C-alpha cells in the first residue's frame, strides 16, 4: 500500500511527540539537575522505579536524562553504608540503563564512562573496567565533561586497574594538562598514589591541591 511521504513524516512527528510527553517529567528533572536547581531525589526514584531499560526509547535527550537522573540519586545514596539494598538496586539499574544507552549510541564516550563507573562500583573485573575506560577515551578523548569524569575515575582506580588501561590513562593526563593550561579550573587535582606514579612517569607536572 502506498503511503504519501507527508503522512510518514506526520506519523514520525506524532511518535516523537508521544515520547516527549511520556518522558516529560524525567526530562524536566534532568534539566533541573543540569541547572544546579533543587530536585527531589525521592521523586526521581518514583520515576525511575517505573522504568525498564528495554523500554527506554533510543532518543538521545531521553537516554541522557535517564542517566543524569539515575546517577544523581545514586550519588546521594552515598555508598552502600546508608541503605545497602537500595544502593544495590540503584547500581544494577544504572548498569542496565548504561547498557541500553550503548545499544542506541555505541560511540558515546560518556556512556562508556558511566558503564565503567558502574562496573567499578560493582567490583567488576579489572578487564571489564579497563575496557569501558579505554572505549570512553577512544570515543571522547577531549570532550571536557567526559575527560574530567575519567580523570576522577583514574584517581579512584587501583594501580592494577590503571595499568590495564595505561595508554588511555596516559592520553587523558596529557589532555587534562592541556585543558588545565587553557581553562585554569579552580578545583585542582589531588591525585592518588597510583595516579601520581603515572603522572610522574609522563613528565607532566600538574598543579595539585
Image: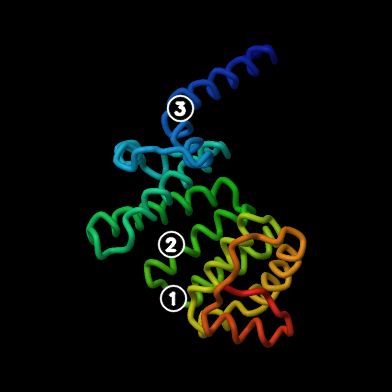
* Mark 2 vs mark 1: in front: 2
Q: Earlier in the sequence, mark 3 or mark 2?
A: 3
Q: Is residue 120 depicted above or below 163 in this figure?
A: above
Q: Secondary structure at mark 1?
A: loop
Residue, x 25% and y 54% (percent of image)? 86
| Quarter of the figure that contains the C terminus | bottom right
Q: Earlier in the sequence, mark 3 or mark 1?
A: 3
* Residue 156 screen position, x and y as percent: 48, 73
Label disc, if present, on residue 24 of the rendered structure = 3
Q: Which quarter of the figure has residue 38?
A: top left
Label disc, if present, on residue 125 of the rendered structure = 1
Label disc, if present, on residue 87 of the rendered structure = none
Q: CA distance from mark 2 to mark 1?
A: 12 Å
Q: Secondary structure at mark 3?
A: helix
Q: Secondary structure at mark 2?
A: helix
Left or right position of 36 against 89: right
Left or right position of 123 against 68: left
148 vs 16, nearest the viewer? 148
Residue, x 67% and y 70% (percent of image)? 172
Say how the picture is coloured.
Answer: rainbow
* Residue 139 screen position, x and y as percent: 67, 59
168 vs 195, nearest the viewer? 195
Q: CA distance from mark 3 to mark 1?
A: 37 Å
| Residue at the spot of label 2 | 118
* Residue 87 screen position, x and y as percent: 29, 58
Q: Badge 3: how crowded within 10 Å, few (<14), some, or many (20+)? A: some
Amino acid at each position: 500500500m502506498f503511503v504519501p511521504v507527508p503522512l510518514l513524516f506526520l506519523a514520525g512527528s506524532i511518535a516523537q511527540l508521544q515520547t516527549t510527553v511520556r518522558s516529560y517529567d524525567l526530562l524536566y528533572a534532568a534539566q533541573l539537575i543540569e541547572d544546579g536547581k533543587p530536585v527531589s531525589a525521592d521523586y526521581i526514584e518514583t520515576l525511575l522505579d517505573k522504568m525498564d531499560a528495554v523500554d527506554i526509547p533510543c532518543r538521545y535527550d531521553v537516554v541522557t536524562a535517564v542517566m543524569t537522573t539515575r546517577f544523581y540519586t545514586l550519588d546521594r545514596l552515598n555508598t552502600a553504608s546508608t541503605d545497602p539494598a537500595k544502593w544495590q538496586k540503584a547500581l544494577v539499574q544504572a548498569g542496565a540503563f548504561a547498557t541500553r544507552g550503548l545499544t542506541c549510541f555505541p560511540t558515546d564516550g560518556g556512556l562508556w564512562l558511566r558503564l565503567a563507573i558502574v562496573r567499578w562500583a560493582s567490583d567488576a573485573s579489572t578487564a571489564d573496567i579497563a575496557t569501558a575506560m579505554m572505549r570512553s577515551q577512544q570515543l571522547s578523548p577531549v570532550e571536557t565533561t567526559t575527560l574530567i569524569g575519567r580523570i576522577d575515575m583514574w584517581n579512584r582506580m587501583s594501580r592494577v586497574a590503571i595499568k590495564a588501561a595505561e595508554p588511555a590513562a596516559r592520553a587523558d593526563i596529557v589532555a587534562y594538562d592541556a585543558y588545565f593550561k587553557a581553562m585554569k579550573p579552580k578545583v585542582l587535582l589531588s591525585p592518588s598514589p597510583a595516579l601520581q606514579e603515572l603522572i610522574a612517569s609522563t613528565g607532566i607536572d600538574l598543579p595539585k591541591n
